[in-house]
Amino acid sequence: MTRQENLRRNVSALNLNKDIFESSLLQKSIREGALHPTWYCDFSYRTNRLVRCTDNLLRMQRFTVMTEFHGVTQYVNNIPSNFCFDAFNGKRILKEESVSAWFVQPDSRMNRIKTHYTNTYMTPDGERILQRDLSKMIDNAYAHRTLNADVILNSEAVWLESESRYERHSICYQWSNGDWYTEPQPTKLYDYHTGPRHSVTNDPTDISAHMGFTIGFEIEKSEMPDFEFSKEDVVLTHLATLERDGSVEKGFELITPTFNLFSSKTDERLRGLEDFINIKGIDNAGGHIGYGIAGYRDRQILDKLAGWVPLIFSMYSHRMGNSYCDPKKISRLKESGDKMQAITMKGSFIEFRIVSAVPNLKTLIWRLNFFRIMSRYLDKPFLEVMAMVIDPQSAIGKHLRSNIYSDPAKFVRLIQDAVAYDKQFSDNPLSLVYSTMLTSVVAKDLKKSKAGVVKELIEA
């Protein structure tokens, strides 16, 4: 048998492709040293084959390294410096396409390997994990299995406490208690201005009903209750309404019934709503107060309270300029139909929108008592109101000092701001002489009686 025939027989035994078996390519490979002249005599030819390398020469496969370059398998004689070993596929890959990834060993321990980035998932915390191991890491922070055996990344998953399992975030709903469910939460609130409105001013058992003063509260909260409730039960039990409100999109607005201002039952009824009133979230919230007097229309009521308006503006000065409660002169408040002004005209009552959010029941009761005191001193000019405020023995003087205005500096600022707002918003403001004397008297002596204050102002 000739050498050429022997070569053909061995190449045939290696099952080489015809396009590879070219005598010129074989001769060139031998001539360049890629193949030994007697390579076919090597016993290993029975388990090896010839492969074309990246330098276009034939070599025995066992003397080459298989690599993957942009998804194409290639063979090289020497490992280039820009390649690394893919421990997952057993190939050499470009370093720039390699990543370090976690994989699960047979004993369930975690380890790292280098592999091609397409074999991995990027986890929410920036780590990578082999795709094949994703389903093996159900109890790990990286991935979870759903009821349908789908594997989802942690960033896509939520925990269903009621079912003790994970589910895809996009098909779940978070309820007001913070837990996730596969069904939407039953409607907890009435839509804006669609809930029922109630009044208890005609309660036959309420002996104060004849006094004719009414009050109601709109209490906004920026978060939902963390306890179970039913809007229907709140109406049935308390005659109050829970509604959505655009200023507190993630919370609610509690609308109380219209109360008799001087009734002790009003305090009791408000305490029945304490759980809602004490909810802490009050971001962007307000605490509007509706106030009415039997037999009087809105403009008449505001006239009777005109002397108190600068003080109320001063008490809630941080709300001044808010687009939801625009302050104006009293005459303009009466004439304007603007629903977003500090005090709005409502026909049979007026609404104080300037009042800030209600942090708790204690604050609400304090405001209730403020309106009770104010209602005993209607038609008082601003100067006389200020004289009562300064007097520590008067009802309003004691009441203001029982709150944050027990701080002398804050009390002085309250008076100074009230004088400034009287000048800016009252139709008949104090003269410069009186307003200057008023602020100087307060700054000099905070313990003057009402009579002493009035006497000193008159003498001035």
Image (cartoon, rainbow, N blue to C red):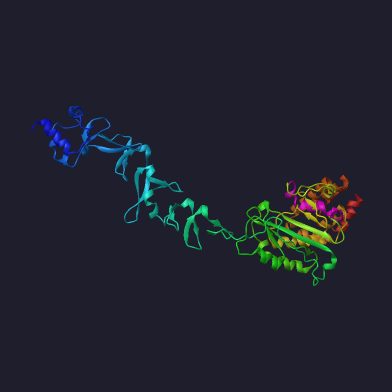
Q: Is residue 299 magenta?
A: yes
The residue located at (52%, 54%) in the rendering is 171
Q: Could you tell whether 28 is left or right of 435 in the image? A: left
Q: Position of residue 445 (x, y in %)?
A: 81, 54
- Which is more toward the observer, 107 or 402? 107
The residue located at (83%, 51%) in the rendering is 441
Q: Is residue 392 visible?
A: no
Q: Is residue 241 visible?
A: yes
For residue 198, which quarter of the picture?
bottom right
Q: Quadrant of the N terminus?
A: top left
- Which is more toward the observer, 51 or 364? 51
For residue 277, which quarter of the picture?
bottom right
Image: magenta residue range: 298-321
Q: Is residue 344 magenta?
A: no
- Which is more toward the observer, 63 or 455? 63
Main SS of the magenta segment? helix
Q: Position of residue 374 (x, y in %)?
A: 82, 59
